[in-house]
Image: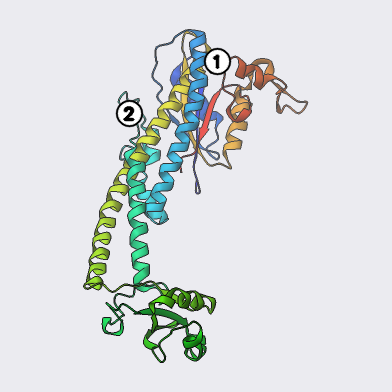
Amino acid sequence: MSGSTKYLLVSLPTSITPSNDHDEALTALRSAVSTDFGTVYPFSIPEFKIGTLDALVQQADELAKLDTACEGVVGKVGDSLQSILGGDEDKIAQQKTVNDKPVDQYLQTFNWNKEVVSIDNDIKTKYNQYNQVKTNLTALQRKQTGNLATRSLAPVVDPSLLVQDSDYLETHLIAVPSQINKDFLKTYETVSPMVVPRSAVKITSDDEYTLYAVTTFKKHGQEFIHKCREHKWTPRDYTYKEGGKEEEEKEIDRLMKEERKVWGEALRLGRTGWSESVMIWIHVLVLRVFVETVLRYGLPLQFVCGLVRTTPKLSKKVKHSLDASYSYLGGNSFGRDKKGRITKDDSGTSTDMQTAGHSTEGGEYSAYVLYDFEIS
């Protein structure tokens, strides 16, 4: 089957076969699910210690909430991996393994692990650190490659063009849109008082802007800057610093190295975190199946559990086939119409079952234990 995958964990009493045999019950489950709709694999559920009925009902409620929380964590860690790998689906798929196995293989060979570890907050911390470094690097790189209205001026400004250490004069660097260069040269001397005549010197230009150095008296410098903005000329805040160009280059090199390092750490933690979060989620689902099985079928525990691998679209047909074979397990909640088709009496059933502690997956009562999930 192509496309996305959907899984169903199904638990049935072994009494679905006359022999009450586990293997025959699994064969019956496989027969109920047509191979056109999905593939059934045996799924091992340990026999846990069973408490009181009240305790089981409370556990069922707590596990339902934990199930939702775990699914959310898996999604968030997956989103982090997607961001780290730039949305490259092939690379993302390579990183999404569970206990170093593809998801399918992990589920088909599932064994209960008492030592499943909790997800470390280091994943979120490292991902945030990576994002911060990446943001800083991107901002610095943009300064090197943007237009003259935004880029760093350290590499392009000759310090000899600047008035420095004067008590009265100062130099302003103005990025002027190329299409209004002539207007600038005609009017810059008169936009404010005390602009030094003919002081405009072209420093450099790009496809969008021309950068000029203009000298004014300090006492009218802020007024000149204000008038420049009114004319849509961009004043650049720049102070010459000896060795500034070299410092910027070193900082870019440092940030690039740091980004590569933190990216690798974030990827490693993301891969580990996704694996662990999926393992925890599956263990919670296994507990839900067990608790619900006890609540549904009672003691002594005699049941079979199967993992159905299908697609979101075909999962509806899988459920319909299971209903057709095992609706009788639901007692009066299920019946048949005149044409022999399975019908459900949902009036009050779901509410009653939830009150009694039973699962009603997706708000709909099924006659048997079933939990469906997708891992993407």
Residue 274 shows up from this direction? yes
Q: Please, what secondary structure does the residue beneath circle 1 have? A: helix
Location of residue 324 in the rendering, given as x and y in whole percent from the top left corner? 63, 27
Type of amino acid at the residue the image marks with label 1: Arg
The answer to which of 74 and 367 lies nearer the viewer is 74
Mark 1 Cα-neighbour bin, 10 Å: few <14, some 14–19, many ≥20: many
**Residue under the point 27% across and 65% down:** 252
Numbered tag placed on residue 116 in the rendering: 2
The answer to which of 73 and 107 lies nearer the viewer is 73
Q: Is residue 143 above or below residue 121?
A: below
The answer to which of 70 and 151 lies nearer the viewer is 151
Type of amino acid at the residue the image marks with label 2: Val
Q: Earlier in the sequence, mark 2 or mark 1?
A: 2
Disc 1 marks which residue?
296
Location of residue 16 in the rendering, given as x and y in whole percent from the top left corner? 54, 18
Location of residue 21 in the rendering, given as x and y in whole percent from the top left corner? 46, 16
Alpha-carbon distance for marks 2 and 1? 28 Å
